[in-house]
Image (cartoon, coloured by chain):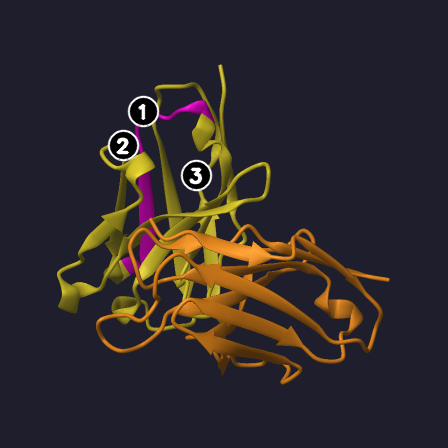
Amino acid sequence: EVQLVETGGGLVQPGKSLKLTCATSGFTFSTAWMHWVRQSPEKRLEWIARIKDKSNNYATDYVESVKGRFTISRDDSKSSVYLQMNSLKEEDTATYYCTGLGAPYWGQGVMVTVSS
Amino acid sequence: DVVMTQTPPSLSVAIGQSVSISCKSSQSLVHSDGKTYLNWLLQNPGQSPKRLIYQVSNLGSGVPDRFSGTGSEKDFTLKISRVEAEDLGVYHCVQATHVPFTFGSGTKLEIK
């Protein structure tokens, strides 16, 4: 059974940092290209980052609004993908999902609230 | 960025009816590898999104064949034949051809 479990969310003040973890099982993680997608309180979905696999040099891509602030990474030995979020802004408030996007895996999501 | 225009924003249908949802992109979604990375997702109330269709017309594993996807280039359609109660929720199209990947605004399907 495929499982993706996100952790690390919570309430944080603007300007602070948070690191999300997505622990996976049930599929061949090492060859999967993994993504983070967020859903705003208004329920709009936004893709924010992707990391490719080792054969593609773990290349990463980001949406412009998080470039320089967020970093996606992975640990194939732990079948996990991470999202380091720095300099958080109120507009980063959302539910964050890790997903294979084009592949049939989505986590249950983790809420991040940025507020003073 | 590629803009995905999804219509209608909402639908109310009776069980057994058929419906179509449109998704139009601001540029061609044909990737340099020749494939078209247009997917359809369903988000049931209170749940995470789940993949229904990938690469325009390929049905995901376990997805009923009442769902079908068609289209090419910039114009795509999701059709649900014989709607069932479990189909309620929000349908999203997403393009994964051009970075940044982008989503449509969603179509909320309600059951009459």
Q: Identify the residue under disc 1.
A: A87
Count of picture labels: 3
Whether residue A113 is situated above or below residue A21 in the rendered picture: above
User: Sequence-wise, which precedes: disc 2 or disc 3?
Assistant: 3
- In the image: residue B98, left or right of residue B73: left
Q: Is residue A110 visible?
A: yes
Q: Tell if the residue under mark 3 belongs to the same chain as the one under mark 1.
A: yes
What range is drawn magenta here? Answer: A78-90
Residue type at the position of mark 2: Arg
Q: Identify the residue under disc 2.
A: A69
Disc assigned to residue A9: none
User: Sequence-wise, which precedes: disc 3 or disc 1?
Assistant: 3
Whether residue B70 is situated above or below residue A2 in the rendered picture: below
User: What residue is at 27 percent from the left and 70 percent from the top?
Assistant: B31
Label 3 and label 1: CA atoms lie apart by: 16 Å
User: What residue is at 41 percent from the left and 53 percent from the top?
Assistant: B102
Q: Identify the residue under disc 3.
A: A8
Of labels 2 and 3, the one closer to you: 2
Residue type at the position of mark 3: Gly
Q: Residue B67 at what x, y percent from top left?
A: 62, 78
